Image (cartoon, rainbow, N blue to C red):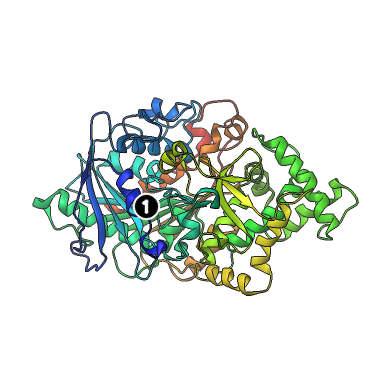
Amino acid sequence: MNMHRHGPWWGAALGVAMAGLGGCASTAPAAGTGATTMFTATRTTEHRNSDDLLTGGLGLDGLRAMAPPAFANPTQPTDEERRRRALWTNWRGIADLGPLGGYGTLYGSTAAVPGREFSADARIDGANASHRVLVQVPDAFDAAKRCVVVTASSGSRGIYGAIAVAGAWGLPKGCAVAYTDKGAGTDYVDHGAAGVEVKHAHSKDNPEADWGRHVKQAAQFALQSLTQAFPDQAPFAWDNTRVIAVGISNGGGAVLRAAELEGDWLDAVVAGEPNIDAAGGRALYDYTTEAALLMPCALLDFDDLPQSPLTTAGRAVGALRCASLAQAGALSGADAKAQAKDARAKLQASGWTDAAMHAAALSVDFDLYRAVAVTYASAYGRYGFGEHPCGFGFAAQNKDFTPRAATPEEQAAWWSDASGIPPGAGVGIIDSRMAPPDLLLPGEQCLRALWDGQGADAERVRKGVAALRAKAPRKGLPVVVVHGLDDGLIPAAFSSAPYVAMAKAAGADVRYWQVRNAQHFDGFLALPDYGARYVPLLPYVYAALDGVAAHLDDPKRALPADAVIESVARGKEALGEDHLAIPR
């Protein structure tokens, strides 16, 4: 049996992910759309009282708890337990819920929203793997406005990976919210000591090339689900239901790719810190592999970098990297100080700003550049499990970092706890090239060579990257792009800025908010030094949504104008409106 076409990711995993009633497979297209998409494994579940749509009954206090909601039986959690824990994980991974951060008071909502969830598998024509779609329909759905907010998970997260982005804005307003995991997610498969299979890396689909189509299928499923939820008000169709797309990071890239698709099915788009590859910019794989090699050394040339619990380890890696690259002839300088200055100059020459490099300390400390490069090299080259061209893999690990079989307890928590891209949730990166003294350098050099080197593997990866180039959105479609100018993971100079320039040159209606003192990860603002230095991006995404919704309600109200937003770091104070300086 072909595992990639019929494997356990989209069958059994969906069963343990969604609580309640099982439904029959559906072959009906979304009402009024002309769609031929088939949705299978459809389910409907109810979420009320102590198990609402937005937080699973946890509320703000429960989301702020330092430990995740426990499983009564660690090896056999209930569907309700899995769902509540996944909500906890994804809220904390995306939003700044710290007591000084202002969430739930200054901006955002965690108020209980009762309602129903409709879930299914959807499949892009020709894909090996399906992607998961889910629609949350609040009991207070506003039938007078017929609003759908469609979104895609940030990063490689599972189906609730945009709950704090789209759900927190749309559900309290009476909108249905449609989600897609865009062909990634947390449905890991353990193969014992041979490793762990990860959908984003190993489906052989290059799912990023289809992100826009994933978003549209989620919106189609929303119309079908609303027709099922409110048959007396049917049909729900593009011409009688407002559809607003929103996402951040990879989800932001996904909604911008959806904006390219033909037809008048979308009414507005808001994209936060999007991973988007446009003419005049740089591909994620290019600048990520560059940063993996050079950034640890370059940061030694900076003073007053933000501090994390792993800062000491990150600086130690930097000292080794300077020496290694100098010995290899890749950097000049007689000592670490001179070598770091050269590394910094090389990054500046390729477009990195000092603001982005300051915030990049987080990605170095937590080894994020390598994690992205490992997974995406496999996805772009359409490599299956055990086929990585640089010999990387994923597995549960012993204390000496050798692979082992995952325990039943670890496997039971993956769907709820994982981010969809190792390391994390007990799954680490296995690097077959690791060698002293600079342990990670050989593997990272191999990853970089897949971008700037020669050979069949490099051509295969570059072909996958070439399939990601964005086009301009449909003319007349309101689009707002929001990006922090201190973003060190997806720098605005490589992504949003060239995308906006390309789109405007094509005559598209794109507005651009550039936010000073904002980096990529609101969730990391719980670290005291990061919270003191940077403002969260989510308030600006919500404000942009408010702006486009107001314009759709009354076209005489102007869309948000282009702005460079002069935010103010909060220091040790609680976040206030003056810190955010949101355009009004």
Q: Residues within 10 Å of mark 1 (few under 14, many from 20)?
A: many
Find residue 181 and report its horizontal and vertical position in percent: 39, 53
Left or right, residue 494 beside residue 64: right
Q: Tell me, yes or no, if residue 84 can be seen here.
A: yes
Q: Quadrant of the N terminus?
A: bottom left
Q: Quadrant of residue 41?
A: bottom left
Q: Amino acid at mark 1?
A: Thr
Left or right, residue 94 beside residue 321: left
Residue at 80% of width from left, 55% of height from top?
325
In the rendered view, tell whether residue 64 sits above or below residue 409: above
Find residue 245 and report its horizontal and vertical position in percent: 36, 54
Numbered circles on residues, count: 1
Residue at 77% of width from left, 55% of height from top?
345
Viewer-proximal residue, 505 or 271? 271
Q: Tell me, yes or no, if residue 509 can be seen here.
A: no
Q: Quadrant of the C terminus?
A: top left
Give the farthest residue toward the left.
232
The residue that disc 1 covers is 151
Viewer-proximal residue, 506 or 15? 15
Q: Quadrant of residue 310?
A: top right
Find residue 420 and report its horizontal and vertical position in percent: 47, 49
Residue at 53% of width from left, 34% of height from top?
579
**Which secondary structure lies at badge 1?**
strand
Give the farthest residue toward the right.
334
Viewer-proximal residue, 266 or 277? 277
In the rendered view, tell whether residue 547 sits above or below residue 461: above
Left or right, residue 428 beside residue 215: right
Find residue 447 and report its horizontal and vertical position in percent: 65, 61
Viewer-proximal residue, 435 or 26? 435
